[in-house]
Amino acid sequence: MYSSPIDPIEDPPIGRDEKYEYTDTAPEFEDPFGNEEFAEVKYRTMAWWQCGMIMIAETISLGILSLPSAVAALGMAPAVVLIVGLGILATYTGYVIGQFKLRYPHVHSMADAGEVMMGAFGRELLGTAQVVFLVFIMGSHILTFMVMMNTVTEHGTCSIVFGVVGLVLSFVLTLPRTLKKVSWMSISSFISIVAAVLITMIAIAIQKPGNGQVDTTVDTSLYKGFLAVTNIVFAYAGHVAFFGFISEMKTPTDYPKTLYLLQFTDTSMYVVAAVVIYYYGGRDVKSPALGSTSPLVSKIAYGIAIPTIIIAGVINGHVACKYIYVRIFRGTDHMHKRNWRSIGSWVLIGLVLWTIAWIIAEAIPVFNNLLSLITALFASWFTYGMSGIFWLFMNWGRYFASPRKITLTVLNLIIVGIGGCLCGLGLYVSGKAIHDNPSSASFTCANVA
């Protein structure tokens, strides 16, 4: 139905050869944003570095806060191998997503990709899963906001009130309709998380609460070990939004640069932060990691982390709203208008999604458990498994065309298997954790810090 002159694997990587230019071969009505020459609101406006900052802000946020406790559960050596290994694998799967987008330029979301592969059923299946996944992530950011406010104010009021404040702030910041406007906020988000993690690392290195209790390996159970693995996977869970990010780039062929910027930055930060905080924090290091130092430093770190706690959630919220908005108004002029119908629809979609996210945060008020559930249900597939399926779909009938194809076929089958394993075992361990945790009372005024 749709074609591209670029072979996603056999041709040189996009961006290395100028003759490979981006050509939208889909009919104009298939483009989610249509002709923007005279549009009031234009979407395809992001430079590659702006897209890179959004991807970094979306990815390096809550995930990094759970990694030190993952190292404590797995041991230093296995955890570092997993963080680096899963980061390299996430780079490859992200690259495949970019190639799928270039092969089928009309794809704006996982739902569109599902339609390419499985028709209407695939569109509804992946579209629903994408929105639910993003809303769960939004909920995790509201939960972290609640933890932050309880820490800073020493549980100054009911946790539900803090959740409502997080809901309102996130909703207001989601009101801009274009990612370019959100990209400016993403810069402050990145600076925020870097500063907060640095303060935590410096303080914990001075205070040494762990008393040198560091284990290269640990004797752990499948339950505890895999719960930690799901937290590492969540740290790379930004792939679900990549189609939407590429769609709003001025030059989609610049996407590999944004991907490499993201993956180099996040993998490096994850290893350094996880190892340093665990090394000095010891076996009882907390999750989120900002709470591993003295009460005063924790308050300072959480205060500095406020922009990333909110904005990273806002980016995911924007992507969720944009999917529904495009689904409703695709092929019409309403996306480019500033009238009551266009603006009102965007506001209503945002309000509904953020309200659902708040309900999720109140229902599962335990940070690690919520991350594990999200990973098992969605990140396992959107970050890893689905990319393997995308490659197999694009290369249908050519799996054994050459030794290189055979190797890549085996690799992508393994990636699909990894997605299935993360999903199945992840559901077991996250379900057990939520069931067994005595502090997981829902909709409570109690301190969720």
Image: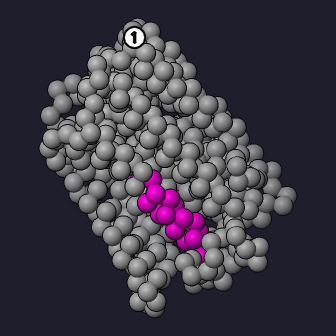
Q: Amino acid at mark 1?
A: Pro
Residue 413 lies in what quarter of the image?
bottom left
- In the picture, the quarter occupied by the C terminus is top left
From the viewer's perspective, is 60 left or right of 445? right
Secondary structure under tag 1 reads helix
Residue 206 lies in what quarter of the image?
top left
- Indicate how the structure is coloured in the image: one colour
Along the line of sight, which residue is nearer the eye, 409 or 111?
409
From the viewer's perspective, is 222 left or right of 307? left
From the viewer's perspective, is 320 left or right of 409? right
Is residue 92 on the magenta stretch?
A: yes
- In the picture, the quarter occupied by the N terminus is bottom right
All told, the count of numbered labels is 1
Residue found at x 60% / y 35%:
190
Q: Is residue 240 visible?
A: no
Is residue 238 shown above or below 274? Answer: below
Which percent across, then down, holds residue 379? 39, 53
Which secondary structure is most common in the magenta stretch?
A: helix
From the viewer's perspective, is 77 left or right of 23? left
Which percent across, then down, holds residue 57? 57, 40
What is the crowding at mark 1: few (fewer than 14 residues within 10 Å), some, or many (at least 20)? Answer: few
Residue found at x 34% / y 24%:
281
Along the line of sight, which residue is nearer the eye, 2 or 172?
2
* Residue extending farthest right: 38
On the image, numbered disc 1 is attached to which residue?
Answer: 295
Residue found at x 70% / y 37%:
184
Q: Is residue 73 visible?
A: yes
Q: Which residues are magenta?
A: 86-103
Residue found at x 66% / y 76%:
26
